[in-house]
Image (cartoon, rainbow, N blue to C red):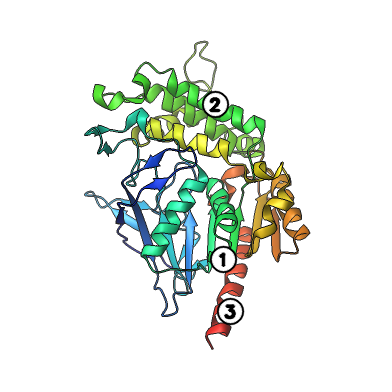
Amino acid sequence: MTSIGIVSPQSMHFAEPLQLQSGATLADYTLVYETYGTLNAERSNAVLVCHALNASHHVAGYYLNDKGEKNIGWWDNMVGPGKPLDTDKFFVIGVNNLGSCFGSTGPMHTNPATGKPYGASFPVVTVEDWVDAQARLADRLGITQFAAVMGGSLGGMQALAWSLRYPERLRHCVVIASTPKLSAQNIAFNDVARQAILTDPDFHGGDFYAHGVVPKRGLRVARMIGHITYLSDDDMAEKFGRDLRAGKYQFDFGVDFEIESYLRYQGDKFSEYFDANTYLLITKALDYFDPAREHGGDLSKTLAHTQAQFLLVSFATDWRFAPPRSREMVQALVNNKRKVAYAEIDAPHGHDAFLLEDPRYLRTVRTYYEQVWQQLRKEAA
């Protein structure tokens, strides 16, 4: 297996207004995306990869900075030549979602109506809004049906939403470490993280750009809270335990334990590159996602109109998007007589396992995509 190598982002501008779930309209916007592999003549081998909270369109391959340092795609172990999602076979697209801070139109961009950054005035977006925007990009690229739509965590919510909003436009739906809705506990974690940002004096009601500051303290705490939920207790214990940085208690409120040092490092790093308004928007999109709400909470009824085949993967130690949530989706699909494969991986890494190298997990995805590929070849013969 080799890397895709150096990749370059592309952008697509849309002048057609996008009606949002909230009732607001985004009149003018740009989506940034990357593609890997080659689209076949039938345009049947395209796979859309949807990103999670702090990721982007940069799924695989790498960029080189002026120092020759590599910025490697967030799912590079999954996507590339010879990898589970093999770019020698499939044409893979990664799209940066609206409201992000990685290129697509978001709070940091200029609002054409005011000539100033959107800031706090950027409309709240939902998972369904992102899927609608992705569908428009697919239209522009001449892709009427995806071989698969795939995502982990929040990306898995988008894949599920694709199967509901555009059932005829994807043949396979790959949902990894995800859920059909957040639990009350998950919403609570998100709100505490948002409050850390909203109460930072440098936030300035979301219009901090005009003040030349960044609400770093809030972003640090938000990331620390989030990161705790991405790891399992066993993983934390194995990596850090109760190890002390100085070998003894300092009897102050600085950093005593290695886990404290790790969380503060993650928070500091996050505050240097992520936008506070984007964090607020994306966590709200997570909270709002609940497609079964329109059907009285009946997930079986919600999934009745899906047409895709499904692969769902969960991880035993993921307590944020726990396996029972994936099994709930599997049962609803079985109730509707859909073709569905399910793997529950006993990995120790918590929610972050979907980004890591567990061989059982990667083998499951590889096997599934090999079946997708064989199906395409058979139909083309």
Identify residue type, mark 3. Answer: Gln
Residue 264, x across and y down, in percent: 45, 27
The tally of labels here is 3
Identify residue type, mark 2. Answer: Asp
Q: Nearer the viewer, residue 144 or 248?
A: 144
Mark 2 to mark 1 CA distance (whole Å): 36 Å
Q: Nearer the viewer, residue 112 or 228?
A: 112
Mark 2 or mark 1, which has the lower sequence index? 1
Query: On residue 168, which mark appears?
Result: 1
Q: Secondary structure at mark 3?
A: helix
Left of 98 or right of it: where is 379?
right
Query: On residue 270, which mark appears?
Result: none
Q: Secondary structure at mark 1?
A: helix
Q: Decide: is 55 above or below 87.
A: above
x 61%, y 47%: residue: 178
Q: Quadrant of residue 370?
A: bottom right
Mark 2 or mark 3, which has the lower sequence index? 2
Residue 311, x across and y down, in percent: 64, 61
Q: Which residue is mark 3?
A: 374
Residue 356 seen in the figure: no
Residue 280, x across and y down, in percent: 45, 31
Tell me if mark 2 has few (under 14), some (14-19) or many (20+) residues whose alpha carbon lies within 10 angstroms of its own: some
Q: Which residue is mark 2?
A: 191
Left of 221 or right of it: where is 110?
left
Mark 3 to mark 1 CA distance (whole Å): 20 Å
Left of 358 or right of it: where is 53?
left
Left of 186 or right of it: where is 137?
left
Pick out the residue farthest to the bottom. 381
Identify residue type, mark 1. Answer: Glu
Question: Mark 3 and mark 2 in contact (Cβ < 8 Å)?
Answer: no
Tell me if mark 1 has few (under 14), some (14-19) or many (20+) residues whose alpha carbon lies within 10 angstroms of its own: some
